[in-house]
Amino acid sequence: MVVPRDALLISYLLLIIDRGRGRYSMGFDYKKFTMPIQEPLEEIVGVYQRHHVPMKKVSQPRTGRFIRPINLAWFLQARAISPMAAVIACFLWYRYGLERTMTIKATRHKLAEFGIGKTTSRRILRQMEAVHLVAVTWQKTRAPDVTILVDDAVSGTARGISS
């Protein structure tokens, strides 16, 4: 026996409250809720399998921060200037790895991540510029633009890093 849906909804809404016991009871037969399946189950499942949408793979965010591989000869020349020049060299290569450009703006806030002060950075950058490790564009009221120069072992000339 098939019962119309409206009749099912009305019978479902007819809940009788048993006030003496404080609980709800249904005043209808639950078998009336069974509805005959019009289509075979295999066809219903087949429809969902045909319209399956693949899930997009969620990428995991990177948790660590790394410095790209550094040209060892270039780094050793920077280390020969002073220990703080080695720190600035690490800073420059780290920013190069993030920005993917050979010219880096050396702001106070970026340098502060590595514990480098404004006057120290200016002094060391001048020393690194003197030995042709970097090319610096100095500006009066702005942070300097620093271009990393790597000695080309074959030609012996200084060139900027290509990304």
Image (cartoon, rainbow, N blue to C red):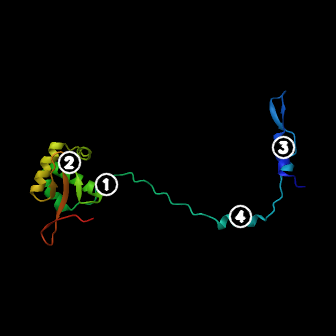
In primary-sequence order, the first of circles 3 and 4 is 3
In primary-sequence order, the first of circles 2 and 3 is 3
Between the residue at mark 3 and the residue at mark 4, the CA separation in whole angstroms equals 31 Å
Name the kind of residue labelled 1 in the image. Answer: Phe
Instruction: Report the residue at 45% width, 55% height from top.
Output: 60
Circle 3 SS class: helix
In primary-sequence order, the first of circles 4 and 1 is 4
Circle 4 SS class: helix
**On the image, numbered disc 4 is attached to which residue?**
45
For the residues carrying marks 2 and 1, which lies nearer the camera in this image? Answer: 2
Which of the 4 image quarters holds residue 36?
bottom right
For the residues carrying marks 3 and 1, which lies nearer the camera in this image? Answer: 3
Instruction: Report the residue at 81% width, 40% height from top.
Output: 13
Between the residue at mark 4 and the residue at mark 1, the CA separation in whole angstroms equals 49 Å
Circle 1 crowding by C-alpha within 10 Å: few under 14, some 14–19, many from 20? few
User: Could you tell me if the residues under marks 3 and 1 are in contact, i.e. CB atoms within 8 Å?
Assistant: no
In primary-sequence order, the first of circles 2 and 4 is 4
Residue 9 location (% of width, % of height): 81, 46
